[in-house]
Amino acid sequence: MTSRLVEIKNETGIHTRPGNEFVSLAKTFESEIELEDCNGKRIKGTSLLKLLSLGIKKGSKITVYANGSDEEIAIEKLAYLLENLKD
């Protein structure tokens, strides 16, 4: 399992459009993708509704987890996406 802590810099945090972008990318990997907020709530990264339920705002720190055959590249690409979200 590989993980990385990411700080959200997007002014409006993660809402439907950037959330959908993350979920779509997460579904391209064979690895299981999960996200965990600073309160310890952990969700599957392939569910837009669960992702939105975290209420991630600008400045939030979340941990991205990947477990599987392509976990290294999954973490790289997903963390990059989260760090560079734009509205």
Image: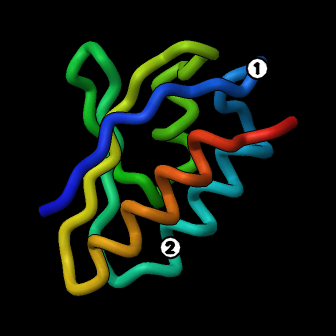
Q: Which mark is residue 59?
A: none
Asked if 74 appears above or below 84 in the picture, the reply is below
Secondary structure of residue under mark 1: loop
Percent across and percent down for residue 22 are 60, 55
Image point (26%, 14%), residue name: 39
Name the outermost residue toward the left. Answer: 1
Image point (19%, 68%), residue name: 67
Percent across and percent down for residue 37 are 34, 25
Percent across and percent down for residue 59 are 55, 13
Mark 2 or mark 1, earlier in chain: 1
Residue 26 left/right relative to 24: left
Within-10-Å neighbours for mark 1: few <14, some 14–19, many 20+? some
Inspect the image, locate mark 1, and give the three-letter code of the amino acid beneath it.
Thr
Asked if 4 appears above or below 24 in the picture, the reply is above
Asked if 57 appears above or below 9 in the picture, the reply is above
Mark 1 lies on residue:
12
Mark 2 lies on residue:
27
Asked if 41 appears above or below 6 in the picture, the reply is above
